[in-house]
Image (spheres, rainbow, N blue to C red):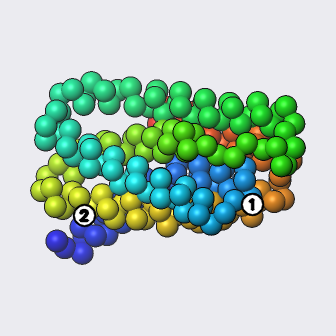
Amino acid sequence: MSIAFFIESFLLGIGLAMDSFSSSAVNGLNEPGMSRRKELLIAGTFGVFQGLMPLIGWFCVHVIAEAFEEFRRFTPLIALILLLYIGGKMIISGIRGAEEDEKPALSIRDLMLQGIATSIDALSVGFTLADYGFGAAFLSSLIIGLVTFVICIGGVEIGRAFGTRLSRHAQIIGGCILIFIGVKIFFGF
């Protein structure tokens, strides 16, 4: 494998991690006092999903390409629905005026939904990896996942820093950001 392979995988990781970075920042914004363990869980979840999805896409190209092509049309809509749901829940909770200590912590279910919603477009990246053998596709996916993990750690930290300043409105702001990410994915801009 060449240096170009590693650079390309690294750049793919950066590009794919942007929605996960935003969601990580929202999670940090919503829960500025979260533990380091939870921060690692959030970054790890996004890293696993962003790394796994291109590998699943690669598999689909090699095994079930026609069926995946049909499903691919619906991925932006699925991401939009999931992020509208999570963002809407956050906005409603923020409007109802939950106190600082009553703020609902990020549930595992919501984190998994965020992971799926922000990485579903990475399935398409599997098509760009289609010329690779399994080993190269796996390595590229691993690099993408690791890059996403590191970027998401930064996202949570940034969100936590702003979350302490914006705590009264953090849920509303965070919900709006998640909805914006869903709309961005849906309309492809």
- Where does label 2 land, which residue? 139
In the rendered view, would you say 165 is above or below 189? below
Report whether residue 83 is seen: yes
In the rendered view, would you say 81 is above or below 43? above
Instruction: Identify which residue is drawn at 22% across, 52% down.
Output: 129
Instruction: Identify which residue is drawn at 47% across, 58% down.
Output: 44
- Where does label 1 land, which residue? 33
| Cα–Cα span, label 2 and label 1 | 35 Å
- Sequence-first tag of 2 and 1: 1
- Residue 1 lies left or right of residue 73; in this view the side is left
Marks 2 and 1 close (CB-CB < 8 Å): no
Q: Which amino acid type is shown beneath numbered disc 1?
A: Gly
Which of the 4 image quadrants contains residue 86?
Answer: top right
Report whether residue 21 is seen: no
Instruction: Identify which residue is drawn at 54% across, 39% down.
Output: 109
In the rendered view, would you say 141 is above or below 179? below
- For mark 2, give the secondary structure: helix
